[in-house]
Image (cartoon, rainbow, N blue to C red):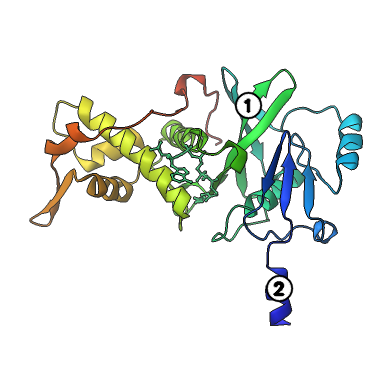
Amino acid sequence: SGKLENITKVKNVDRIVLGKYIMETWYYSPLPPEYHNCSTLWVCEYTLNFLRSEAALKRYQQRHSIRMPPGSEIYRKDNISVFEIDGAVQKFYCQNLSYLSKFFLDHKTLYYDVDPFWFYVMCEVDEYGCHIVGYFSKEKESEDNYNVACILTFPAYQRKGYGKFLISFSYELSKIEQKVGSPEKPLSDLGLLSYRSYWSQVLVDLLKNEKQPISIQEISERTMMKMEDIISTLQVLGLIQYYEGQHVLDLRRIDNIKFGSKGLLCDPSCIKWRPKV
Ligand code: ACO
């Protein structure tokens, strides 16, 4: 039976259709059994309802006029919106989002008990509606001070800066909460690349503009990045020395560090959000 289990852990759905995109799946996802042997999974991009055929999706969307995610819109700028969704209230939506993200996440234990999480869903908005491009989840109470549990950009939207937008959004929420945060470990390879890129950009920007000496502690208070993440990033950038038992900033090489495009960071003045008490 162990063997059988392994066989069924092989990728079960070959591709998903989400809005105007077809995406090949990367990994196994423990979908409800009724979807196990359909090679293409049709997903309503607004409600995340799963369907087994294009005709069924069309019928479904004719009956349902919703063209946006549930929850409240807490960010809007130009054609980008973010919705905050309570896992305990929108269980079906958040469970289906977790099943979908498992198609692209190998290493993570995903929690299908979605009650203890908030979900922050990023959308591109046009005249037809709000199209989900990615999201991150966040524990309502994190003992380890994680500010992101799981983060995903759907493959059709990857490498356009949306991952870094979501990361910057998560740190802006941490700034509003006045809580230092860090993503849940372990990070995937793509997760680490994206975090490394965001952290580097924020630190180099801050240090280039800072005229006074500054401590790691102060950097952490301003960016809400955890000290360990700051130190490891500065090490990779070659901007820190370990000297007589202490980490000492060494900015001689900072002007040599160049970034490509800055990408799309969120505009904190467009966030309408208060921490829950
Ligand atoms: N190869 C090389 N570099 C890459 C790649 C890639 N395939 N993908 C992203 N990057 C780099 C980009 O070049 C960019 O760096 P730069 O701005 O310095 O050039 C940086 O990573 C971020 O790129 P974005 O376009 O902002 O990120 P994207 O929208 O592609 O999303 C994400 C990144 C969310 C990690 C996405 O790859 C994804 O969803 N992967 C599958 C799920 C996953 O692994 N999630 C993270 C798990 S860890 C956790 O959840 C806490």
Question: In this orientation, does residue 154 appear?
Answer: no
Q: Quadrant of residue 73?
A: top right
Quadrant containing the N terminus in the rendered view: bottom right
Q: Nearer the viewer, residue 59 or 217?
A: 59
Does 21 sit left or right of 229 as displayed? Answer: right
Does dot 1 land on a helix, a strand or a loop? Answer: strand
Give the residue at the far left of this rendering: 244
| Numbered tag placed on residue 7 in the rendering | 2
Q: Closer to the camera, 10 or 97?
A: 10
204 over 269 or under it: above or below: below
State the count of labels.
2
Task: Give the quarter of the image for residue 49.
Answer: top right
For the residue pair 223 and 177, the one nearer the viewer reads as 223
The quadrant in which residue 151 appears is top right
Q: Residue 124 bears which disc, if any?
A: 1
Secondary structure found at label 2: helix
Res 19 seen here: yes
Q: Residues within 10 Å of mark 1 (few under 14, many from 20)?
A: some
Q: Residues within 10 Å of mark 2 (few under 14, many from 20)?
A: few
Looking at the rendered image, the disc whose residue lies closer to the viewer, 2 or 1, is 2
Residue 238, image x and y in percent? Answer: 19, 46
Q: Mark 2 or mark 1: which comes first in sequence?
A: 2
Q: Mark 1: which amino acid?
A: Glu
Contact flag, marks 2 and 1 (Cβ < 8 Å)? no
Q: Residue at x 34, y 46 (%)?
A: 226
Q: Amino acid at mark 2?
A: Ile
Residue 273: percent from left, percent from top: 54, 27
**Depth order, front residue of 276/211:** 211
Which mark identifies residue 198?
none
- Residue 110 in the image: x percent, y percent? 61, 57
Q: Residue at x 72, y 50 (%)?
A: 15
Separation of residues labelled 2 and 1 (CA atoms): 37 Å
